[in-house]
Amino acid sequence: MTLEKCQIINHVQKSLTFTAYDVKWVPSSARFVVLGQHARGTGALQVFELNNGDIKLIHEAEKQDAFKCGTFGAAALHSRQLATGDFSGRLSVWDLERTDLPTYTVKAHEQIINCMDGAGGVGSQKGPPEIATGSRDGAVKIWDVRQKDKPVAKIAPAEGDVVHDTWAVAFGNSFDDQERVICAGYENGDVKMFDLRAMSLLWETNVKNGVCSLEFDRKDIKMNKLAVATLESSFNVYDLRTLHPEKGFAHVTEKAHDTTTIWTVRHLPQNREIFVTSGGNGSLNLNKYNYPDQRSKKDAKGRDEGVPGTIELVNTAHVAEQPVAAFDWSPDKQGLCVFAAFDQAVRVGIVTKLDQYR
């Protein structure tokens, strides 16, 4: 059977009056949130709704400090409260119907929060609701909004160590109420995975270039795959099913986006083998991970070292004249997505014919 090629369609776009750094689809709705920075340095939070083929602004708020990132990952579906990280190092949680004051706020870091992720809420309901923040100070902190002021866990450089910016964080392995890992990517190319139950370093590697984005293919299953996007046009996909004591996880490396930065990597919620990367050349790449014919291969000592899969480039589309710095899939409607570029515009896209990969 010949598969019909998926198409990446730039459906509708809206100009913004600020620079967007993150976009997040509001679960179980036709709305999405755009976060960023006004030219005067203040924070921009705007909520848009798809309405008869157009994008309509339905709510906006301006705050003292610019927003860098956000997540719904720790929110209950009925509340859908958005957590944000800002340039002052503050973590806040917002009711999008009333954004005059946050429902929770804490000075999480002394410097900018570059990245965050959530677990225990929308899309991953096992375990406690937690938010991970990564900062320019090199630290990763885990927050439970039910506990005020202090993180439940902190992963930071030892005194005297060189401090590297934390550029990306992601939760994974949350398949029951006890297990959970956090993975962090740093400006020097380090990738570190920590077991939060045992509070120990599980695995680390270096991908040679700054880690702009990383994501598990699913948060709420046993670790399966991890995708890591870098500053210098390459991404790695790690098979997490087998950890070799010396070689680590088997992986495949691919170049993409014409030697420009790969800003984001996001897996399709309805199919974990499909993922998008966004590039500094204004393009989106739709990729598919293909598992190897054999799962294991023995080394000279008889230890299983795993076998990497392959990456298929399904399609690519030039969608903006500036880097596409933020991307998010709709968790509810397959193929619907939202993305923002540095040309001060937000766009809603549609990826067609994804059912053929089920």
Image (cartoon, helix red, strand yellow):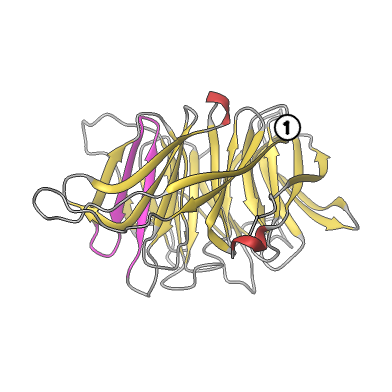
User: Magenta region: which residues?
Assistant: 179-199
The reply to whether residue 63 is in sight is: no
In the image: residue 39, left or right of residue 158: right
Quadrant in which the N terminus is drawn: bottom right
| Label 1 element class | loop
* 269 w.r.t. 136: above or below: below
Q: Position of residue 25 (x, y in %)?
A: 67, 56
Taking the magenta stretch, the answer to whether it contains residue 59 is: no
* 198 w.r.t. 13: above or below: below
Most distant residue in the left direction: 301
Question: In the image, what residue occupies the spot 49% across and 59% down?
Answer: 118
Question: In the image, what residue occupies the spot 37% across and 64% down?
Answer: 173
Question: In the image, what residue occupies the spot 42% across and 56% down?
Answer: 291
Q: Position of residue 266 (x, y in %)?
A: 55, 50
Which of 60/302 is in front? 302
* 270 w.r.t. 226: above or below: below
Q: Position of residue 233 (x, y in %)?
A: 50, 29
Which of 292/34 is in front? 292
Q: Position of residue 179 (x, y in %)?
A: 33, 68
Amino acid type indicated by mark 1: Ala
